[in-house]
Image (cartoon, grey):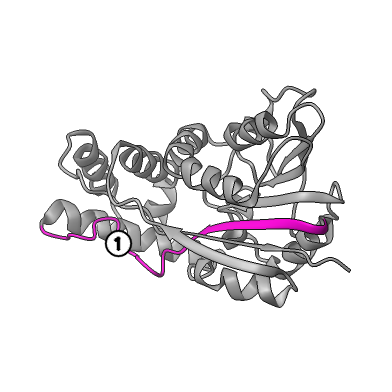
Amino acid sequence: MSADDGYLLANRQREAGTRFTALATLFDPTTVRHFDEIGVGAGWRCWEIGAGGMSLPRLLADRVGPTGLVVATDIDTSWLDSADPGTVRVLRHDVGADDPPVTDLDLVHARLVLTHVPAREAALTAMVAALRPGGWLLLEEADPGLQPLLCPDEHGPEQQLANRLRRGFRALMAGRGADLGYGRTLPRVLREHGLTDVAADAYFPITGPACATLERATVEQIRDRLIDGGIATPAEIDQHVDNIAAGRLPELATSPLVSAWGRKPHD
């Protein structure tokens, strides 16, 4: 999906790599903890949806070993070209429109994907269909509606500008079909799709170098959209980026990441 057909943060843009690295730093420990809880191990067959970069496919490949399978898919595989074909199978795939590329899976995982997929119900149906009986679905989605501010402590002009740009970013996302409250629905959604043993939690980074790196890359990636939408002037965007670089915004938060997991029942 490209910026022109709805998605603001297209993989083909140069800032995407920086964003993938920052997201991995922020959220991989949480995702790995859930892999541990689910019991992902040797011989497992896994599908990583909307992989973006290689961080999670490699983590899964290390766990499942040579007897397992990791299929990493994305609508744009630009940042997956470095995959070892003997370890990770990379496929271009639209989860909202295409049939599952593999079935009889032990794990299907998607992080920061379904919020941006208009055909969410079709995507979820495909994910569940790809699982073997007893297999696990792990979904992780940001929920900007639960915490909409970039700077929760808005105590000065730098924070006010940052939050205004964040509100504009959220409006741009919503205008392109993103569901900004989707994360909180995940436990119910999994139950509605027939999964059992459903559980969920959330992680909320409120400050740190990766938060700053992610914000700077995001703003630079959507700069033209912010300007064209009348959300900010070029000077205001430059000021915001300079505030980040100069350390005048040490407390930059991300949206809470809601993780929910459930198991496909045995027949």
* Residue 133 location, quadrant: bottom right
Amino acid at the residue labelled 1? Leu
| 245 or 32: nearer the viewer | 32
Q: Residue at x 69, y 36 (%)?
A: 77
Compared with 8, 210 (above or below) is above
Give how far across and how far down residue 192 sits, in percent: 70, 77
Give how far across and how far down residue 243 sits, in percent: 19, 41
The region drawn magenta spans 132-155
| 116 or 57: nearer the viewer | 57
**Label 1, residues with CA under 10 Å away: few <14, some 14-19, many ≥20:** many
Q: Residue at x 67, y 64 (%)?
A: 262
Compared with 23, 233 (above or below) is below
Which residue is disc 1 drawn over?
A: 149
Position of 79 with respect to 150 (left or right) is right
Give how far across and how far down residue 254 sits, in percent: 36, 53
* Residue 163 location, quadrant: bottom left
Compared with 183, 241 (above or below) is above
- The outermost residue toward the left is 156
Q: How many labels sit on residues?
A: 1
Q: Quadrant of the C terminus?
A: bottom right
| 238 or 212: nearer the viewer | 212
In the rendered image, residue 136 lying in the magenta stretch gets the answer: yes
Give how far across and how far down residue 160 sits, in percent: 19, 59
Position of 146 with respect to 39 (left or right) is left
Q: Residue at x 54, y 36 (%)?
A: 13
